[in-house]
Image: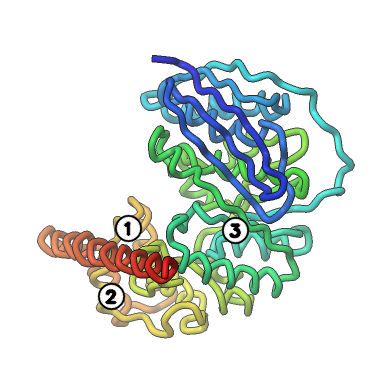
Amino acid sequence: MSTDLTASVSTDSRRRRSTAELTIGGEPFTVWTESNVDIDVTGTAWLPPLRVTSMPKGLTLDVAPAVDEVALAGSLAAEEVLLGWYPDQLQRSGTRTKAAAPEHSEPGARGVGCFFSGGVDSFYTALKHIDEITHLIIIHGLDISLDNEALWDEAVDRARKMADDLGKELIEVRSNMRYLHAKHGPHWQNQAHGAFLAHISLLLSPVLGKVYIPASDDESRLAPLGTHPDLDPLWSSSRVTIVHDGIEADRVAKLAVLAESPTAMRHLRVCWSNLSGKYNCGICEKCIRTMIGLHIVGAGGRCESLPKKIDPRSVRWMYLRAGGEGGELFAKENLERLRAQGETDSDLVHALDFAIHRGRFQQFLVTTKFYVVDIGFALVKYRVRAILRARRSAG
């Protein structure tokens, strides 16, 4: 079997689509990314995602056309960081890719971007750098799957309104990159999604000279992850500087900033449960976590995109492990903050305490409900909606 990962990159300027025709260990795969603005025509933007794709099997990476030499050196430095974090899962890749001399452009000649899902982290970074940022970037194919057109239509419509409210231009991106990493690895959350964001940052080099990646963790809980302050800047090129931003503030501190923004309180999007077909379902762990955080900062009921009231029953029976250990950690932190500010005997405090300290049988019931009802039934409804939409389109 071949030990190469080769990529032939082409650009459709009319569609503003960059396509990489890959051969991975002898197997073909086509991956693409497109935008509503002009994009880079070199192979540079493909270095981050293909570097991490080559690492599970230690393949030799060969990208054509030539790539920016600063980005190439940075990708090798990023590889060393990932190898240090995941020595049992990843291997050192080889390189046959040819490098081109760095391009120099006038500082400030291009804009400053910020990845923007409409969530807590991205809103915080956008508001923090509101005077510097010129563009917000939303991605179809990241947290909203490519086949979930209904949710995407609502999310991008709201994103356009948010960008307009904040006086920024919105860059809309679509990509099938997650399909590549789902098939060939590496682990999306732990090792790959930061490289995907770097890919988009570099692809937008004709428009942007600097891009902020909002931090998902504050400095007290930093751990190896696909996007990280020690990793993200290494993916930069001679034309684009990538900045990991926001580790100084935890989630509640960020919500305190968002509570002062009418735009955030109208359009905040936090739900992880895309299968629900709703902008925010209002009952998943992440929705409830956010509602509790807003309650803590005195903004309970003010967010128009979430339920006005927190249902203690939903808190008692929320599944805390949907996103790994984070749900339990956030629940404990929220409980501590509630008690610290004098809320010790409310229905919310009792419900949150119950959720954290459930017994084995209760945890079994919650887990079963989550996978059978919340996920299983939602998946069925999601597929039915997709079939009906396809029939309407065909008719």
Q: Nearer the viewer, residue 66 or 267?
A: 66
Q: Is residue 328 left or right of residue 294?
A: left
Marks 3,2: beta carbons within 8 A:
no
Would you place residue 146 above or below residue 342 in this image?
above
Name the residue that disc number 2 marks: 314
Q: Nearer the viewer, mark 1 or mark 2?
A: 2
Residue 180 left/right relative to 207: left
Residue topped by disc 1: 328
**Along the line of sight, the residue nearer the viewer: 394 or 253:** 394
Instruction: Give the residue furthest to the right.
Output: 106
Q: Does any portion of residue 337 appear in the rendered image?
A: no
Please tell me which of labels 1 and 2 falls first in the chain: 2
- Classify mark 2: residues with Cα within 10 Å, few (<14), some (14-19) or many (20+): some
Q: Is residue 97 left or right of residue 150?
A: right
Give the image location of residue 97, x and y in percent.
Answer: 63, 20
Q: Secondary structure at mark 3?
A: strand
Which of discs 3 and 2 lies nearer the camera? The answer is: 3
Q: Quadrant of residue 383?
A: bottom left
Task: Tell me the element at label 1.
Answer: helix
The amino acid marked with disc number 1 is Glu
**Amino acid on which the number 2 mark rests in the picture:** Ser
Tell whether 331 sits left or right of 11: left
Residue under label 3, please give it: 138
Image quadrant assignment for residue 380: bottom left
3D distance between C-alphas at marks 1 and 3? 28 Å
What percent of the width, then of the height, locates residue 256?
57, 71
Please rate how many residues cluster around mark 1, counting C-alpha atoms within 10 Å: few if below 14, some from 14 to 19, many from 20.
some
Residue in the image at 68% along x and 36% along y: 236
Report helix, strand or loop for mark 2. helix
Q: CA distance from mark 1 to mark 2?
A: 15 Å
Write the residue at 76% across / 59% down: 134
| Front in this rendered view, residue 228 or 162 | 162
